[in-house]
Amino acid sequence: MDILRKIEEYATAQSERTAFRSRNGEISYGELWERSGRLASEIENLMCDSRDPVIVYGHKDPMMIVCFIACVRSGRAYCPIDINTPAQRIAQISEKIGKPLVIMAEKTSAASEIEKREMFTGSRWLIGYETIRELTKSGKITTALSPCSDENDFYIIFTSGTTGKPKGVRITVNDLNNYLDWAMSLAGGIEERAVFMNQAPYSFDLSVMDLYLSLATGGTVVSVDRLLQKDSYRLMDYLSGQGINYWVSTPSFADICLAEERFDAAFLPEVKAFLFCGEVLPCETAKRLIKRFPDSKVINTYGPTESTVCVTEIQITEEMTAGNEPLPVGKARPGTRIELNPETSEIIIIGDTVSPGYYKEPMLTSKTFFFMDPLSACESAGARQATYSGGSRAYRTGDKGHFDEDGNLYCDGRIDNQIKLHGYRIEIEDIEANLVTVYGVKRGAVAQRIRDGRVESLTAFVIRDGDLITDDYFGRKVIRTALREKMPSYMVPKRVIFLDELPVTNNGKLDRKRLREMA
Amino acid sequence: MREKLLVMIEELCGDEIVREDPDIDLLEEGLIDSLDYIELLLKIEDEFGLKMSPSELTREEMATPNRIIAVVEKRLA
């Protein structure tokens, strides 16, 4: 698979066909190719010798996709930042890249554009939305382009890091192409020219599944923006007319839709499959979907951002959901081998979609990424080597797992303090590092509240610094509000509990188990 | 029933203020998000057998604990 070439081919073969649609507008394959070419030329002129990644800031505008493809065609990776990212996170990412080129791919009012521009004060260049529209419409291609290839980074997605600063996962052209070769076989084979529902923001790699699977098969992405996701009534109306064939979302989003009684096969008759990734698929969600959509497939997958979206697949059947047991995540794709650390049961992913590491973080990278000699790896893995076919990058996921007698993998939680909440990956230490910087907080810890084996919400435990903040609703509100300015809202603990001291174990370490019970 | 609903709302919002001030605007104060809201409707269905689709209710109708209680009482009457 060569994804850029594929898009170019579709741009010729079906130039009029819609590649992407959202409430902000739509764009055809022909336009996508032409406009991204013009922008790529402009990026090349601006950046000259620098091959630094380009920040694309936006949400669900068709220009987002144009910008992504333009960056890659200019020979530079893109780093997507969603508009719902708080200013402090943006500054951290911007700083890590170091004087980046920033492209604003979301229509905003003039006032808000000025405000947004201020968030990127450290940028080398900043191109506004209207300029992008103009450039991509009438700009001239003045330079020869040398697109990203092979081991060049294709995109860099920043995720929560334990130090309180986000880390950028590098995904190469090879990683993405290898992933797509397999992903096209998901759900028994993705049909050409289908319609994909996109729910995830582009700063979350679940979106890679729908966007690039669709572009690789000449399909159409129907992208649902955040406001629409919050308005069930309009959401249902919007979805019903789109002819959706492949539904790609977190299980949490399916739960929201299942709360609507009309959400069933009669309402969305064209759905061939629901593709889930990003968090544990609860048995209950799968059961209800199978009941409401008896002719659609429910597909569960597993994989961290560090190995390109996902690396396992299984179709969930009615029988699997009968016992209300945790669901399997399936078997590894060809090209990936999964091993378990015999001591910790940690899942280790070895294969040709594993990232080369974190952007400009050699220390962090060497902690979880390593190289595995394919031969010795096969020996130690015993019977589970059948699917391995080359590549030797390996990643320690931090997820615990086990195999059943049929060779299906199950995920059993984490070996560290990373959690998944509504599909978002969060390092508890990241929240804690930010919590202690809040005015009036002396010390703090965060724990997850677990219901039915699934993280339900987060609780912050706070030791106040004297009486700088009050021991009541206003104090709790001050903390929540301060955290919302420092981190994405999904990371902000719902509960705040004031304590005189934090519980410790016999060894004097923070007693996280006790905290989880108190949460 | 008022008590049961308050327990549910407190559980979802994670703050006892909903009990101390049942006229507090849950959305404005950032005490509830869309996922919590869906969860609340599901719990009401489980507990009282009252089916409510998110799309048939306005945000205003369900803005405060007191208003939520009023809606449920009215529909069950």
Image: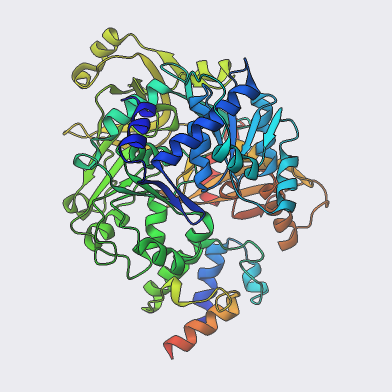
Which residue lies at the image location 63% right of the left edge and 44% below the top edge?
A129
**Which of A140/A30 is in front?**
A140
A124 horizontally vs A201: left or right: right
Location of residue A481 in the rendering, given as x and y in whole percent from the top left corner: 70, 53
Q: Quadrant of the N terminus of chain A?
A: top left
**Which of B14/A277 is in front?**
A277
Query: Splitting the image into 4 quarters, where does residue A207 fall?
Result: top left
A359 horizontally vs A415: left or right: right
Which residue lies at the image location 28% right of the left edge and 44% below the top edge?
A193
Query: Splitting the image into 4 quarters, where does residue A124 fall?
Result: top right
Kindly give the residue lying farthest to the bottom in the view shown.
B77
Vertical placement of residue A378 versus A180, above or below: above
Location of residue A474 in the rendering, given as x and y in whole percent from the top left corner: 75, 61
Location of residue A348 in the rendering, given as x and y in whole percent from the top left corner: 36, 23
**Which of A72/A373 is in front?**
A72
Which residue lies at the image location 26% right of the left edge and 53% below the top edge?
A324
User: From this viewpoint, is residue A179 visible?
Assistant: yes
Location of residue A307 in the rendering, given as x and y in whole percent from the top left corner: 40, 27
Vertical placement of residue A157 versus A199, above or below: above
Q: Identify the coloring.
A: rainbow
User: From this viewpoint, is residue A78 visible?
Assistant: no
Which residue lies at the image location 51% right of the left edge and 21% below the top edge?
A75
A212 horizontally vs A436: left or right: left
